[in-house]
Amino acid sequence: MIESQTLILFFSTAVLLALSPGPDNLFVVAQSAQNGRAAGFAVTLGLCTGLVGHTLAVALGLAAVVRASALAFTVLKAAGAVYLLYLAWQAWRAGAVAGEEAQTTPLSGWFLYRRGIVMNLTNPKVSLFFLAFLPQFADPRHGSLVGQFLQLGVVFIFATMIVFGMVSLLAGGFGERFRNSPSALRMVNRAAAAVFVGLALKLALSER
Protein backbone atom coordinates (compact mmCIF):
# COMPACT_ATOMS: atom_id res chain seq x y z
CA MET A 1 0.00 0.00 0.00
CA ILE A 2 1.07 3.58 -0.61
CA GLU A 3 2.30 5.59 2.36
CA SER A 4 -0.07 8.24 3.74
CA GLN A 5 2.39 11.10 3.12
CA THR A 6 2.67 10.12 -0.54
CA LEU A 7 -1.13 9.96 -0.84
CA ILE A 8 -1.49 13.43 0.71
CA LEU A 9 1.07 14.83 -1.73
CA PHE A 10 -0.66 13.08 -4.62
CA PHE A 11 -4.09 14.36 -3.56
CA SER A 12 -2.79 17.94 -3.27
CA THR A 13 -1.23 17.69 -6.71
CA ALA A 14 -4.44 16.24 -8.16
CA VAL A 15 -6.47 19.15 -6.74
CA LEU A 16 -4.12 21.67 -8.31
CA LEU A 17 -4.29 19.86 -11.64
CA ALA A 18 -8.10 19.80 -11.51
CA LEU A 19 -8.13 23.55 -10.81
CA SER A 20 -5.85 24.40 -13.72
CA PRO A 21 -7.71 25.26 -16.95
CA GLY A 22 -8.10 22.19 -19.14
CA PRO A 23 -10.56 20.43 -21.44
CA ASP A 24 -12.49 18.66 -18.67
CA ASN A 25 -13.09 21.57 -16.31
CA LEU A 26 -13.89 23.90 -19.21
CA PHE A 27 -16.37 21.28 -20.37
CA VAL A 28 -17.97 21.28 -16.91
CA VAL A 29 -18.12 25.09 -16.91
CA ALA A 30 -19.82 25.17 -20.32
CA GLN A 31 -22.38 22.47 -19.45
CA SER A 32 -23.16 23.98 -16.03
CA ALA A 33 -23.60 27.50 -17.40
CA GLN A 34 -25.74 26.23 -20.26
CA ASN A 35 -27.88 23.64 -18.45
CA GLY A 36 -27.57 24.26 -14.71
CA ARG A 37 -25.80 22.91 -11.63
CA ALA A 38 -27.40 19.45 -11.85
CA ALA A 39 -26.11 19.14 -15.40
CA GLY A 40 -22.62 20.02 -14.20
CA PHE A 41 -22.80 17.36 -11.49
CA ALA A 42 -24.01 14.73 -13.98
CA VAL A 43 -21.22 15.59 -16.42
CA THR A 44 -18.70 15.50 -13.57
CA LEU A 45 -19.82 11.98 -12.63
CA GLY A 46 -19.46 10.98 -16.27
CA LEU A 47 -15.97 12.45 -16.54
CA CYS A 48 -14.93 10.67 -13.34
CA THR A 49 -16.33 7.40 -14.67
CA GLY A 50 -14.14 7.94 -17.72
CA LEU A 51 -11.18 8.39 -15.37
CA VAL A 52 -11.93 4.91 -14.02
CA GLY A 53 -11.38 3.64 -17.56
CA HIS A 54 -8.10 5.52 -17.90
CA THR A 55 -6.91 4.24 -14.51
CA LEU A 56 -7.64 0.66 -15.56
CA ALA A 57 -5.90 1.29 -18.88
CA VAL A 58 -2.73 2.36 -17.08
CA ALA A 59 -2.93 -0.46 -14.54
CA LEU A 60 -3.43 -3.07 -17.27
CA GLY A 61 -0.92 -1.57 -19.69
CA LEU A 62 -3.42 -0.50 -22.35
CA ALA A 63 -2.30 3.13 -22.24
CA ALA A 64 1.15 2.01 -23.35
CA VAL A 65 -0.46 0.56 -26.48
CA VAL A 66 -2.07 3.92 -27.28
CA ARG A 67 1.26 5.65 -26.75
CA ALA A 68 3.04 3.21 -29.04
CA SER A 69 0.37 3.09 -31.77
CA ALA A 70 -0.01 6.21 -33.88
CA LEU A 71 -3.19 4.76 -35.42
CA ALA A 72 -4.88 4.11 -32.05
CA PHE A 73 -3.99 7.60 -30.85
CA THR A 74 -5.25 9.24 -34.05
CA VAL A 75 -8.54 7.30 -34.05
CA LEU A 76 -9.32 8.22 -30.44
CA LYS A 77 -8.29 11.82 -31.04
CA ALA A 78 -10.47 12.12 -34.15
CA ALA A 79 -13.47 10.58 -32.40
CA GLY A 80 -13.14 13.03 -29.51
CA ALA A 81 -12.78 16.04 -31.81
CA VAL A 82 -15.82 15.04 -33.89
CA TYR A 83 -17.91 14.55 -30.75
CA LEU A 84 -16.93 17.99 -29.44
CA LEU A 85 -17.84 19.59 -32.79
CA TYR A 86 -21.20 17.83 -32.59
CA LEU A 87 -21.77 19.36 -29.13
CA ALA A 88 -20.74 22.76 -30.49
CA TRP A 89 -23.29 22.45 -33.29
CA GLN A 90 -26.01 21.49 -30.78
CA ALA A 91 -25.17 24.44 -28.53
CA TRP A 92 -25.08 26.88 -31.46
CA ARG A 93 -28.46 25.82 -32.84
CA ALA A 94 -30.08 25.69 -29.40
CA GLY A 95 -30.95 29.36 -29.74
CA ALA A 96 -32.66 31.23 -26.96
CA VAL A 97 -35.44 29.33 -25.23
CA ALA A 98 -36.55 30.94 -22.00
CA GLY A 99 -39.10 30.51 -19.28
CA GLU A 100 -41.54 27.61 -19.39
CA GLU A 101 -40.56 26.62 -22.91
CA ALA A 102 -37.01 25.95 -21.76
CA GLN A 103 -38.28 23.65 -19.05
CA THR A 104 -40.10 21.37 -21.48
CA THR A 105 -36.95 19.91 -23.02
CA PRO A 106 -34.39 19.45 -20.24
CA LEU A 107 -31.44 17.21 -20.84
CA SER A 108 -31.67 14.12 -18.65
CA GLY A 109 -29.03 13.40 -16.04
CA TRP A 110 -28.34 10.04 -17.69
CA PHE A 111 -27.77 11.73 -21.05
CA LEU A 112 -25.36 14.25 -19.51
CA TYR A 113 -23.61 11.49 -17.57
CA ARG A 114 -22.97 9.59 -20.80
CA ARG A 115 -21.81 12.82 -22.44
CA GLY A 116 -19.15 13.17 -19.74
CA ILE A 117 -17.99 9.57 -20.20
CA VAL A 118 -17.63 9.97 -23.97
CA MET A 119 -15.85 13.31 -23.58
CA ASN A 120 -13.29 11.78 -21.24
CA LEU A 121 -12.71 8.39 -22.86
CA THR A 122 -12.22 9.84 -26.35
CA ASN A 123 -9.32 11.99 -25.15
CA PRO A 124 -6.19 9.81 -25.42
CA LYS A 125 -4.15 12.54 -23.75
CA VAL A 126 -5.73 11.60 -20.41
CA SER A 127 -4.45 8.03 -20.59
CA LEU A 128 -1.01 9.26 -21.61
CA PHE A 129 -1.03 11.74 -18.75
CA PHE A 130 -1.97 9.00 -16.29
CA LEU A 131 0.74 6.78 -17.78
CA ALA A 132 3.33 9.47 -17.05
CA PHE A 133 1.86 10.76 -13.78
CA LEU A 134 0.76 7.78 -11.69
CA PRO A 135 4.08 5.85 -11.73
CA GLN A 136 5.80 8.81 -10.07
CA PHE A 137 3.87 8.06 -6.88
CA ALA A 138 4.10 4.25 -6.99
CA ASP A 139 6.88 2.15 -5.51
CA PRO A 140 7.38 -1.59 -6.17
CA ARG A 141 8.64 -1.95 -2.59
CA HIS A 142 5.13 -1.22 -1.32
CA GLY A 143 3.38 -4.04 -3.11
CA SER A 144 1.65 -4.63 -6.42
CA LEU A 145 1.99 -1.75 -8.87
CA VAL A 146 -1.44 -2.55 -10.29
CA GLY A 147 -2.96 -2.13 -6.83
CA GLN A 148 -1.09 1.12 -6.29
CA PHE A 149 -2.20 2.50 -9.65
CA LEU A 150 -5.81 1.69 -8.78
CA GLN A 151 -5.42 3.35 -5.38
CA LEU A 152 -3.94 6.48 -6.94
CA GLY A 153 -6.71 6.52 -9.55
CA VAL A 154 -9.37 6.49 -6.82
CA VAL A 155 -7.67 9.38 -5.02
CA PHE A 156 -7.37 11.36 -8.27
CA ILE A 157 -11.06 10.79 -9.05
CA PHE A 158 -12.04 11.90 -5.53
CA ALA A 159 -10.03 15.13 -5.91
CA THR A 160 -11.56 15.73 -9.34
CA MET A 161 -15.10 15.25 -8.05
CA ILE A 162 -14.54 17.82 -5.29
CA VAL A 163 -13.08 20.46 -7.61
CA PHE A 164 -15.49 19.89 -10.50
CA GLY A 165 -18.43 19.83 -8.08
CA MET A 166 -17.44 23.31 -6.89
CA VAL A 167 -17.02 24.43 -10.51
CA SER A 168 -20.53 23.13 -11.27
CA LEU A 169 -21.99 25.14 -8.38
CA LEU A 170 -20.29 28.37 -9.41
CA ALA A 171 -20.84 28.09 -13.17
CA GLY A 172 -24.41 26.85 -12.72
CA GLY A 173 -25.23 29.79 -10.46
CA PHE A 174 -23.71 32.19 -12.98
CA GLY A 175 -25.66 30.69 -15.86
CA GLU A 176 -28.92 30.72 -13.90
CA ARG A 177 -28.93 34.51 -13.99
CA PHE A 178 -29.08 34.44 -17.78
CA ARG A 179 -31.20 31.43 -18.70
CA ASN A 180 -34.52 33.31 -18.42
CA SER A 181 -33.36 36.04 -20.79
CA PRO A 182 -33.59 35.11 -24.50
CA SER A 183 -30.68 37.33 -25.52
CA ALA A 184 -28.51 36.25 -22.57
CA LEU A 185 -29.35 32.58 -23.15
CA ARG A 186 -28.31 32.93 -26.77
CA MET A 187 -25.01 34.40 -25.58
CA VAL A 188 -24.46 31.50 -23.14
CA ASN A 189 -25.21 28.94 -25.88
CA ARG A 190 -22.87 30.65 -28.34
CA ALA A 191 -20.14 30.86 -25.70
CA ALA A 192 -20.56 27.14 -24.97
CA ALA A 193 -20.32 26.39 -28.70
CA ALA A 194 -17.09 28.41 -28.90
CA VAL A 195 -15.64 26.47 -25.96
CA PHE A 196 -16.50 23.14 -27.59
CA VAL A 197 -14.93 24.20 -30.90
CA GLY A 198 -11.81 25.35 -29.09
CA LEU A 199 -11.54 22.04 -27.24
CA ALA A 200 -12.06 20.12 -30.48
CA LEU A 201 -9.27 22.05 -32.22
CA LYS A 202 -6.94 21.59 -29.26
CA LEU A 203 -7.58 17.86 -29.24
CA ALA A 204 -7.29 17.52 -33.02
CA LEU A 205 -3.93 19.33 -33.06
CA SER A 206 -2.50 17.47 -30.05
CA GLU A 207 0.43 15.14 -30.48
CA ARG A 208 1.54 12.09 -28.53
Image (spheres, helix red, strand yellow):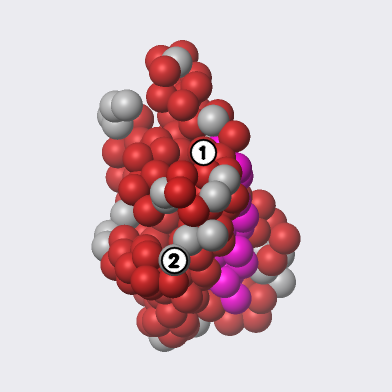
How many marks do you count on the picture?
Answer: 2
Give the residue at x 42% y 18%.
68
- Reading the image, the residue beneath label 2 is 3
Quarter-wise, where is residue 61 in the image?
top right
Residue 159 visible in rendering? yes
- Magenta segment: does it hold 53? yes
**Identity, as a three-letter code, of the amino acid under mark 1:** Val
Q: Position of residue 193 (x, y in %)?
A: 40, 52
61, above or below 174, in the image: above
**Identity, as a three-letter code, of the amino acid under mark 2:** Glu
155, above or below 58, in the image: below
Q: Position of residue 49 (x, y in %)?
A: 62, 55
Residue furthest to the front: 141
- Magenta segment: does it hold 71? no
Q: Is residue 65 left or right of residue 16?
A: right
- Reading the image, the residue beneath label 1 is 58
Dominant SS type (magenta): helix
